[in-house]
Amino acid sequence: MAGPHDGGPGAALRRDRFAFGPLEEGEALVEPILGSWEANMDHALTRSPIDVCSSRGEDAVVLGNLGVVRVLQVNASNSEARVREGDLCLLMPFGRQDRFGYAELAYAYDCPGTIGLLAEQTKLDARLLLPLPEGTPYSLPQWAAYGRYFTAWDNWQKAYGCWRTQVIDSDPADHLVFGWGGGVAFAELTLARRAGFRVAMTASSDERITFLQEHGITPVDRRRFPDLSLPGRRERTDRDRHQRRRASAEALLDVVRNLSDGHGVSIFVDNIGEPLYDVTLSTLAREGVVTTCGWKAGMRLSHLRGAESIARHIHVNTHVWRLPDSPGIRDFMEAEGWIAPKGSEVLYGFDQVPELADDYASGTIGSYFPMYRVNPL
């Protein structure tokens, strides 16, 4: 992406040549095979919540920080280097880490000098490459959705752990975990279901409703609540719009009451943000947890601290995961089959990436796992 633009997010993308220097010690030359289209790429193209070019002090940025790559060359004097020529690897999106191994800046997003996967070849720190398991029965498209699963794994561990500090010995089968629609929420709710919780999630198309049903998640048709989001600026003085919103919110609350035996949501996965945040809080049970690892539609939130304290609500916020945990998450996915369902992805060619950007932004992609292909599988 480069420079100001007019039109949709895809218009911010420019196909061009770029150059990088020789491999330095510890770097690898790779060819991207499949890339996963993530919300952070949409944020970068729309320059919101930050302008990554300005933030990085660079005129142009090569995006793409989650995907499957093939190693072409490694510059490592250490013969024990964990990746070798020909290896298929997952890219861990860590630009700068804190002392505990959590990401402070994201690779190929807000971390200066990092080159993403929207390129036929790129170079990167070999320590960010996580080899795929040898002989894995899962396809490359299934693995290419790993970012949503790694993120969900970390967020679920923290949210469930916090919930258990207050609800010590209650049976999860008596509690509801709910999520606004999305790939990370889907992955997280499958973990909650494995833990014995009731699980439900919103969806806004027949395709996604069927998909959720097939994977043991109760679908809640978002189309039944057309005015659920906060009114935009032009609608803020429209009383009828606010009344319609209250009606949509109350209808959703009725659904939640039915699913939770009247108690409310015990753990709510909300990766949407501002437009739905007050509705999220209104559905929470006492001792409930609202957990997030994304902010697709707004970062600024407000709530009544006293009300949240009295209800003993816990707010959990996580970002990416801890780099040292990556091999363990990969191995859990492989051993337990906790991975994107076969055939659930939608794949765009490299020349179709601008179209993918626009389709993602407009919400017209039916799959939770949109991807782009750079080099042959």
Image: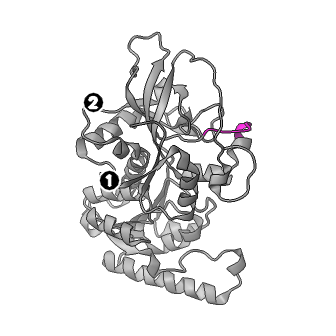
Magenta span: chief secondary structure: loop
Which percent across, then down, holds residue 173? 25, 66
- C-alpha gap between disc 1 and disc 2: 21 Å
Labels 1 & 2 near each other (Cβ < 8 A): no
Residue located 54% across and 15% down the image:
25
As drawn, the label of residue 375 is: none
> On the picture, is 234 further left or further right than 188?
right
As drawn, the label of residue 134 is: 2
Foreground residue among 169 and 9: 9
Q: Quadrant of the N terminus?
A: top right
Residue located 54% across and 41% down the image:
64
What's the residue type where badge 2 is placed? Glu
Q: Secondary structure at mark 1?
A: loop
Q: Secondary structure at mark 2?
A: loop
Q: Quadrant of residue 105?
A: top right
As drawn, the label of residue 343 is: 1
Which percent across, then down, holds residue 367? 41, 59
